Amino acid sequence: MRASHRLLRHTVIDHLAVRRAFPPTSLARVEQAIAAGERRHSGQVCVAVEGALPPLRVLRRLTPRERALEVFGLLRVWDTEENAGVLIYVLLADRDVEIVADRGIDRKVGETAWQSICRRMESAFGERRYADALVQGVDEVSALLAEHFPRTAATRNELSDKPFVL
């Protein structure tokens, strides 16, 4: 992808574009999917949607993965009791999805599984099925967490289920 095309996309994508792709009803569906998944596992799923990056960050070639790692820290997804936080990060301008998992779950699941989920979500984004893709991604992440981190009586909700729109 050429840098000039990427810069243009990041310049024209705004909060209205994010709202069109993820209206309040869609964000509510995602929140419900997170809550339902967390009734089955002791992991913590966090979703962050960002429309675009500031032009200077695009010119400096910040990758979606690098931004996802920043957001993982900013939202304190790493700060969970069992080290089982998972961030699903969407960068709408790039139609890119990144999953960043805390060390506790990442050791058990691995990069291949996360990348597979991301690619399926990105494919659906290409068809403009944004909410469906995000709900499906949350469901798939939750299934992996339920397998490796089943819910216990001591499990508590440590992160907000509400998606963050950055």
Image (tube, rainbow, N blue to C red):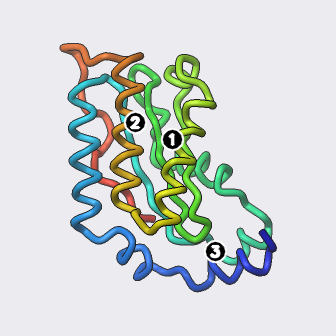
Q: Position of residue 36 (x, y in %)?
A: 21, 37
- Residue behind mark 2: 140
Residue on which the image places disc 3:
54
Give the quarter of the figure containing the N terminus.
bottom right
Q: Nearer the viewer, residue 152 or 110?
A: 110
Image-based side of 82 in relation to 28, left or right: right
Quarter holding the C terminus? bottom left
Residue at 40 percent of width and 36 percent of height: 140
Q: Residues within 10 Å of mark 2 (few under 14, many from 20)?
A: some
In this rendering, the count of numbered labels is: 3
Q: Earlier in the sequence, mark 1 or mark 2?
A: 1
**What x and y, as percent, mark residue 116?**
56, 38
Q: Is residue 8 left or right of residue 90?
A: right
Task: Write the residue at 51% across / 49% down.
Answer: 74
Q: Are marks 1 and 2 in contact (CB under 8 Å)?
A: yes
Label 3 SS: loop
Nearer to me, 86 or 4: 4
**Is residue 13 visible in this depiction of the protein?**
yes
Q: Amino acid at mark 1?
A: Ile
For label 1, the residue is 117
Type of the residue with mark 2: Glu
